[in-house]
Image (cartoon, rainbow, N blue to C red):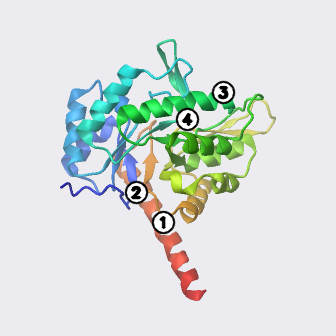
Amino acid sequence: MSSIPRNPTQTGVGLRLPHIEEAVATHPPAGWFEVHPENFLSNPHALELLQDLSARYPISIHSVGLSVGSASGIDRTHLARVRAMVDRIDPILVSGHLAWSTHQGEYLNDLLPLPYTVETLAVVVRHLHEVQDGLGQPFLLENPSCYVGFAGSTMTEVQFLNELVDQSGCRLLCDVSNVHLSAHNMGYDPRAYLNGLPADAVGELHLGGFTLEEDAGTPGGVVLVDTHDTTVAPAAWDLYAYAVTKFGPKPTLIEWDNEIPGLATLLHEAAMADAVIARVLAAEVTRAVTG
């Protein structure tokens, strides 16, 4: 019987290729690691190192290539490759994005938005069933970072996510930084967004850095861009504390994909998340004691 915890209480970090040899050699104090399978499927040496790590750490697989929103359907060859990696690594969670990134067999290096309509819902539900059947386990779907909306949408994003959970049985990966970013860009209340999610379906939380760029369409305006190239912003930490209050302490991940620093920087951010969880839980105990 494996001693690897299936529901880690310590925050994890996104494991990118520049850090994998260090992680194998030094066994850093990370709660768990999350990887993009697309970085490992064509790199046998890295996959061997990851398998070594999976004997010591919980591993989560977070795909950026399954493209559940593509009208042309799921790439079954890629799905089979991800399933083979799942069977080899035995991850604690498998997740991906509410987005599309393929068209006519071509992969696009982006996670593109969807209109929230009944027609889109039917497509994504069908693809989620196919993905979950192919993986042999539930799939966690991550809320996107948003910069534009569709005039033809007939549902809010929260309504759309609720319907996906109800109709497909998928679970949710709540990217708290994405909620903060999208709420700023699209002009809605981030706490109301979190309040609208089905709490029982939330299985993982993400935190990542973003950058500010001038909004060309609004003089003096600022757009938040999901770059994953810096530390988590104070406002995102505040929203994360609210998310922990709302959903409880879920497996949390620090993401950093560009301008990648030393592993120690990611571990420091993870420790900050652990401190937020401890503070929220302590406050809840105090409230319970004092009535």
Q: Earlier in the sequence, mark 1 or mark 2?
A: 2
Q: Which residue is mark 4?
A: 98
Which residue type does callout 4 highlight?
Answer: Leu
Instruction: Indicate which disc residue 277 carries.
Output: 1
Labels 4, 3: front one? 3
Q: Is residue 145 left or right of residue 67?
A: right
Please say whether residue 115 is visible from this viewpoint. Answer: no
Q: Position of residue 160 (x, y in %)?
A: 64, 40
> Which residue corresponds to the image point at 74% horizontal and 47% vertical from the top-left?
188
Query: Judging from the image, what secondary structure is the residue with disc 1 in?
Result: helix
Are the residues tagged 4 and 1 within 8 Å (C-beta)?
Answer: no
Q: Earlier in the sequence, mark 2 or mark 3?
A: 2
Q: How many marks?
A: 4
> Which residue corresponds to the image point at 46% horizontal and 70% vertical from the top-left?
278
Query: Judging from the image, what secondary structure is the residue with disc 3 in?
Result: helix
Which residue type does callout 2 highlight?
Answer: Thr
